Amino acid sequence: MVILGKDEVQDHAYFSMRKAQLDAMHTERLGVFHVSDVIKDCMRYSAYSKIIPKTMTTEDYKSLVMGQIIHSNSMLTKPEYHEMFLAYDFEEEKPLTYEEAKAIPEDDPRQLNILYGSIDDVLEVNGQYVISDKKTTGSLDYFTKKRDKKPSPSHQVQINVYRSLLKKCYDIDSKFGCVIYIPNSISKESRDKIHPMYFKLDDIEDTDKWVKENLATLQHFKLTGELPKRTRNYLCDGFCPYALECFGTYGKE
């Protein structure tokens, strides 16, 4: 009989659990450009994400793991309105089904014209469609105490792009959005809270204008290798994983 030592067992359990957390984050990601790319305040950030591997600590991916578990186990609407696949070719002005998109090789030039995304849930509330997106956060108090009572600007922008793609891909128009903020940890001193935040969506025409501009910028980068210009914003100070590369090359291009 093999006698197992404490360290051997605990190390195996520890690293197996860490690997399982990483495996839980894996989701299929078709294509080249996604909604998360075009909504960044700086297109150079999105360009760097295509060419520089992004490293993470366990703290970095804590919310991602929690988010993936929640997304996989929380359907808020009819099955056909849950995890809705989005793919739209802005050059040909036509939507693609999942099967059509999957059949296009990643290195096919057509991929540069397609914007991909996925909507968590489209809710039906009193005869109206509401695009809902779940966000895990370690700062729930920030959102519950916000004076303007609105979601994060970047989260609003994301759902506005979803509105455009939902209309183009499914001919469903939604004039309202709701971000559901969920804490990624719960202490004994605080109650478990879920904080939905409603807002009205922008006109599709207004959203499409800047989406096409940002998509064109990223297309130019992929075709020429020329990085987009820097855009100074809140990400620069402590939130951009590519900041050192960006700052270090300033004035050398």
Image (spheres, rainbow, N blue to C red):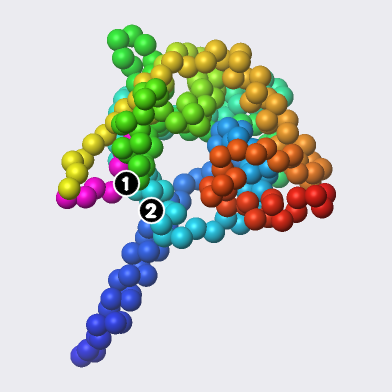
Q: Is residue 6 above or below residue 44?
A: below
Mark sitting on residue 62: 2
State if disc 2 and disc 1 touch (CB < 8 Å). yes
Q: Is residue 190 left or right of residue 252?
A: left
Observer-nearest residue: 66 or 121? 66
Instruction: Name the residue rendered at 27%, 78% in the picture.
Output: 9
Q: Give percent across and percent down for residue 63.
A: 38, 48
Give the CA separation, mark 1 to mark 2.
8 Å
Number of marks drawn: 2
Q: In the figure, 171 relative to 192: above or below?
A: above
Residue 184, disc:
1
Task: Inspect the image, locate mark 1, and give the three-letter code of the amino acid beneath it.
Answer: Asn
The x and y percentages for residue 151 are 41, 28
Q: For the magenta stretch, what is the residue range? A: 181-188
Q: Main secondary structure of the magenta part?
A: loop
Question: Of helix, strand and loop, which one carries label 2?
Answer: helix
Residue 207 position, x and y percent, is 59, 19
**Displayed quadrant of residue 1:** bottom left
Residue at 26% in and 34% down: 194
- Check the image and report above or below for 170 versus 20: above
